[in-house]
Image: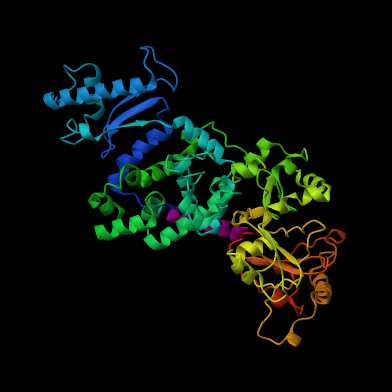
Amino acid sequence: MRVAATLTLILASILIASTAARADEFTRVPALEPNVAFWKKVYIEWSLNQIAFHDEEDLGLVYRVITVPARGAKNGAGLTRTEAIKRGQAEVEAALKALAKKNPKSADGLSGVEREVFLNVKDHPRADKYTRLAKLRVQNGLRERFVQGFANSGLYDKFIRAELRENGLPEELIGVAFVESLFYVGAKSKVGAAGVWQFMSYTGKEYMQLNGVVDERWDPILATEAACKYLKQAKKELGSWPLAVTSYNYGRAGMRGLAENAGSKDFGVILAVSKNKRFGFAARNYYASFLAVLEILRSQDALLKGVPKKAPWSYDVLRAPFPLYTSQLIGTGEIDQAQLDALNPALTNEASAGKVPLPHGFSLRVPKGRAGSIQAKLAALPEKDRLRGMRGVKTVHKANGKQSVSEIARKYGLSADTLAGATGLAAGATPAKGHGIPIPHASARYTLIPEARGMPLPPLPTGQPVLLADASTIDEAAPAEAAPAPPEKGAQEKVAALAAASGRGKVSVGRILAEDLDELPAVDALAGVGVSALPQVDVVAGDLGLDAPWAEETLAASPGTPTS
């Protein structure tokens, strides 16, 4: 018992020390402390209808806070929101001019707005605090939005924190999402940044898919994975979290440039010497607003008392059994348009409206407990309906039995991964002679959502060409007689070994497909004859007994980002 208690104390100490060490990584910059205090007030004290008049460079100078009407309403004086803000600003400007002339030492003799402004800044040490009219800025509060964002974060909090941990990143980086969007999934900035993590399109394309079917910036889960990649790389390049976090707003190259110009990676030094106009209010305050969010989240029991978080996102996942129109999905009666859009926010307007088909194998979230019935109803559709989406392909390439998927892709100006994902074959696979390969539009690229990465690619409906090929690359330099045995025969032998090694029950025969799933190629043995007549196999490479003589060649597909 004593040993167990000692071990418990040691583990607890390690956990506390580890948490403290992670927290210490977010360096406090003395010059930013007034800014942190300011943003805490913006997020948790001032409401949307409260307007603060403050100095844009010295956020310790908050001259006045007024209440204005909501948008579309008027106050008791008959002023709209905009009119009330303009009047408030004029009053502050007049008060500052008067105080600059009087330079009072006490509030005696002062009244109205002059007295209010004096009392608000009397303890601030700046000698020029009344003469900074050119630096006057207006900021509305965000309390209601922060509270709603905190509630919304419950939907994704568990996944985001787990993803951060998996990437070796501090969980506190969830604060970046608060700063960016206050966890509003539909957030879009004036300059086009989108989603919870507010990726611009050009940055999003580095980490996600943006095309006619999906804009993955809108998916909070896929965007989290992208944000982790960005932040991990930013920390590696820039060396500290103040710089890495600020780069989320200003860019990695921008922060490198500021550090080089300052001759230091100390964020306090960079703030002091950087006069670049592009490094403006938002960028200079980004890290401070992040620290303010962390302080609020660490004190949430007091500051957000009584605010319940929403329950974690709950859903089933399926992969499109054929190029699928959303109208077909909704036609099952198991999901409506609103549910489809809410669960799959990455779908473009065209894809959501059923104007373009979702690619074969596309991963979809559906209401909890409905995946099985949806799949059954889709499988029961007439064959002509299941083949409708195939009209969206550019053309059908007839394989000559010599070219690999990557070589065919090159012919049509596609990446090898794009065509491999569309066909279900590995990029190095060689389709059998005479079989048709649908050549997709470039827009058919997508990323599998995490829960779908252990799912095999569904077989195309009966009537489609069945591609028979090995996952391994055929050496075209070898003489014809040295080529492997016909796929059908080889597949029979492989399936026998597979069944013996995996113990996973019935296994169909035919081609071997390799996909990149969770950085491990999955193995999916499909029928070499009518695909509707035989069952699927769900076997991940790690489950295989590697005694099988063909296992090494089957696992030859290179791991990478789990996209299809």
Q: Position of residue 39 (x, y in %)?
A: 37, 37
Residue 249 on the magenta span: no
Q: Nearer the viewer, residue 465 or 164?
A: 465
The rendered magenta stretch, by its main secondary structure, is classed as: helix
- Vertical placement of 163 versus 521: above or below? above
Left or right of 27? Residue 304 is: right
Quadrant containing the C terminus in the rendered view = bottom right
Outermost residue on the right side: it is 533
Decide if residue 117 is in sight here: yes
Q: Nearer the viewer, residue 143 or 203?
A: 203
Q: How many marks?
A: 0
| Corner quadrant of residue 119 | top left
Q: Position of residue 352 (x, y in %)?
A: 64, 42
Residue shown at 14% from the left, 24% from the top: 104
Give the residues in magenta. Answer: 1-22
Q: Position of residue 456 (x, y in %)?
A: 73, 60
Residue shown at 25% from the left, 57% from the top: 262
Quadrant containing the N terminus in the rendered view = bottom right
Decide if residue 265 is in sight here: no
Left or right of 144? Residue 324 is: right
Residue 10 on the magenta span: yes
- Vertical placement of 485 versus 543: above or below? below
Q: Position of residue 305 (x, y in %)?
A: 51, 32
Q: Nearer the viewer, residue 242 or 363?
A: 363
| Corner quadrant of residue 3 | bottom right
Left or right of 262? Residue 352 is: right
Residue shown at 25% from the left, 61% from the top: 263
- Vertical placement of 291 versus 510: above or below? above
Q: How is the image coloured?
A: rainbow
